[in-house]
Amino acid sequence: MLKRWSLFSVLAILATPALAQVPATAPTEATNVEVDPIRCWWRTSAGAVRIGEPFDLALTCAVLENDAVQVVPDESRLGNAVIQMAPFEVVGGTHPADLHSANRRFFQYEYRLRIINPDAIGKDVPIPGLTIHFRVNSRVAANTALQGRDLAYVLPPQSVRVTSVVPADAPDIRDTSGERFEDVAALEFRAGVFEIVGIALIAVGALMILLVLVRLARGSRGRTPADQRQLDTYAVAGVAARELSAVQREREQQGWTPAVVDRALAAV
C-alpha cells in the first residue's frame, strides 16, 4: 500500500511541470480575409473557327454576396442586344438564371458570335476586352446599407483563331429562316384574303366608273326647247283617231250636240 502511494506521488510530481507548460486557451476573434469582390472569365466553344461559322462565347462572373457585403455589378451593358464584340458579330444569346453559394453569386451571359471578314483568315482575332462596372455595398447596424463608389473590373481579351473560309459542304453562310410551316400557311392565307378583297374593290370601282360615265353621257345630250320640238306624224294621227272614236261614242249616246261638234272639229 505504501509503495502504491509512493508511485502515485512520483507520477504527480512529474506531471506537474507538464501541466504548467500548457498555455490557457485564448478566446477566438473574428479576422478579416481579403477576397476579390468580383471575378470573371471567358469560355469559348471552339478555339478555331471558319469565316461565317457561328460559335458560343460564355461570360461567367462570381461576385461577393453575404450578410456583410454585397457586390452589385452593372449588367445593363452585358445583354446580347447591347454588347459590342467587333470585329465579331453577335447573332444571338441567352442569360441563364443566377446561381448562389455561401458567399458568392454567379451570373452568366452566353453569346452567339460569328465573323465575316476575309482579312481575318489565318489570324488570331481577339475578342475585345470587357469593362464591368460595379459597386460594393456594405451593411451596417440597423440593416442600413452603405453604398460604395463606382469601381471597374477589366476582363482581358481572348483570341480566336480563324482558320479558313466556310467548308465546302456548307450551302450558305447566311442564317436560315426561322419561319415555321404554320407561319408560312398563315401568311399564304392572309395573302389570299387580301387578293380577294383587292379584286372585289377593283370590280366595285369599275362599276362606279361605268355609272359615272353613263350619267355624264346622258347629261351631255342637249335638251331641245319646247317651241322647237316636232311631233311625229304617226303620233298625231293616233291621237286624232282616238279622239274621233270618242266623239263617235258620244254621238251615239247623246246625238250631235254643240260640244260633240266642237270636239269633232278639233280632232280633224
Image (cartoon, rainbow, N blue to C red):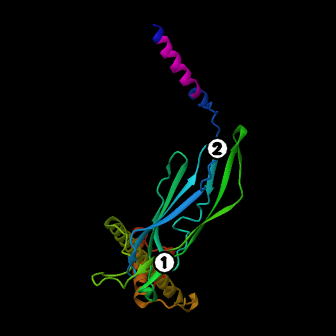
Q: Please count the marks in the image.
A: 2
Q: Give the SS element for disc 2.
A: loop
Up-down relation of residue 165 to residue 113 (above or below): below
Q: Position of residue 209 (x, y in %)?
A: 47, 82
Up the image or down, 261 lies above or below 97; here it is below
> Which quadrant would residue 44 be assigned to in this image?
bottom left
Image point 55% across, 73% down: which residue? 84
Residue 265, can we see it?
no
**Residue 23 on image: x %, y %:** 62, 32
**C-alpha span from label 2 to label 1:** 46 Å
Q: Nearer the viewer, residue 205 or 53?
A: 53
Query: What stretch of residues is rendered in magenta?
Result: 4-17
User: Which residue is under mark 2?
Assistant: 31
Secondary structure at badge 1 equals: loop
Disc on res. 88: 1
Three-letter residue code for mark 2: Thr
Q: Is residue 124 above or below residue 81?
A: below
Residue 39 lies in the magenta stretch:
no
Main structural element of the magenta stretch: helix, strand or loop? helix
Asked whether the viewer can see residue 214, the reply is: yes
Badge number at residue 195: none
Q: Residue at x 64, y 47 (%)?
A: 32
Tell me what residue is drawn at x 47 percent, y 89 percent.
Answer: 231
* Sequence-first disc among 2 and 1: 2
Residue 243: x and y in percent read 43, 78
**Which residue occupies the foreground of this view, 144 or 159?**
159
In the rendered view of the protein, which quadrant contains the C terminus? bottom left
Mark 1: which amino acid? Phe
**Mark 2 neighbour density, 10 Å: few (under 14) some (14–19) many (20 or more):** few
